[in-house]
Amino acid sequence: MGGELAPAAPQRSVVQSRGLELALWTWHPAESVKGTVVVFHGLGAHARFPSVALAAELLVQKSYRVCAVDFPGHGESPGMRGYIESADTLIADGISSVKAALKNDDVRGGSAVAEPDKTPLFLLGSSMGGAIAVEVATGLAAMDIQVAGLVLLAPMLGPAADAPARLLLGALAWTPLAPLALIPSSASDNSKQYGCHDVRQSIEADTLAYKGNLRVAAVAAVLDLGNRVESNLEQVTAPFFCLLAKNEMVLGPRSRAAADKLLRVAVTPAEHRLCKTYDAFHGILCEPLAKRQLIAADIAEWLAARSNPAAAEAAAAAAAHL
């Protein structure tokens, strides 16, 4: 952004989900693939939005193949802009995008190879995308698809509204008010989300990003999603790295409380769980370059340990005997 970090150019394809053709974007590393990372964007964003593109650039440089879907109503996928039908559809489309990513369809050399990817699978999500990543991982576990780790960037791990508000919005989502953009939100204020001036400028010029009041059905769906995640934290079995923002102005306090609970109740061994707070805004990777590089280094280190757990355990054992 602004010449600091130029995102790699992704390859566009299509994933079929619920009878829809959703845009799926893939970033290919120059070297052999160390793993596949499926990235889920936040509300109003899309697969080439800075919070996704900057993550993709980091991961591609570390030899990960990155796939990201434009959810319906976002980016180049069909649907009313900014409209989300339900939490169920978000999760279903997320699972469909993971299954598509696991098919090693490499057409760069002119031939397509549709074979199951044998490298580790990671899920990364920002804000709403973090909640989707958690629920998708749970769904994949039920299908015996192993997730090597979750990277959660300022994830929405709890609803940003109380039960009466959720019930009211849930009811309104079944009325003609559902598609209307009636709800103002700090999530549409770039100054409260992104610390880098160049990133804010690129977002303001982004014609694919949804801006303005949020649609009733979308807010109802997101609140339902957050409530589900908060209620299902005990089902999280994958290793995870949860990155929280010190200057959080979008998520409610229940998301932070849920992150603390996730550390306590997750089935995954404690040494495979990490929760860290950064001096950053909600769009954690969308900070000035120096700060972004420090955050990126932590993500890369955590992924490297999960990509080759045997080597990481051997290194830890050797260090313990020094």
Image: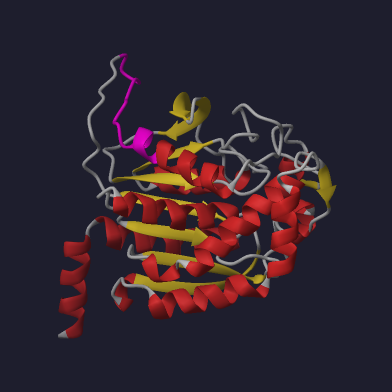
Q: In terms of image quadrants, where is residue 178?
A: top right
Report x, y in % for residue 58: 46, 48
Magenta residues?
Answer: 98-110
Residue 300 is one of the magenta-drawn residues: no
Please state, as top left, top right, bottom left or bottom right, where the N terminus lies in the image: top right
Please state, as top left, top right, bottom left or bottom right, where the C terminus lies in the image: bottom left
Q: In terms of image quadrants, where is residue 79?
A: top right
Q: Nearer the viewer, residue 103 or 231?
A: 231
Q: Nearer the viewer, residue 263 or 67?
A: 263
Which residue shows up at 71% across the image and 34% down it? 81
Q: Is residue 175 left or right of residue 234?
A: right
Which residue shows up at 50% across the image and 49% down it? 55
Report x, y in % for residue 236: 38, 65
Task: Answer whether residue 197 is visible to the viewer in this image.
Answer: no
Q: How is the rendered protein coloured? A: secondary structure
Q: Is residue 30 left or right of residue 201?
A: left
Residue 105 is one of the magenta-drawn residues: yes
Report x, y in % for residue 306: 29, 60
Q: Main secondary structure of the magenta part?
A: loop
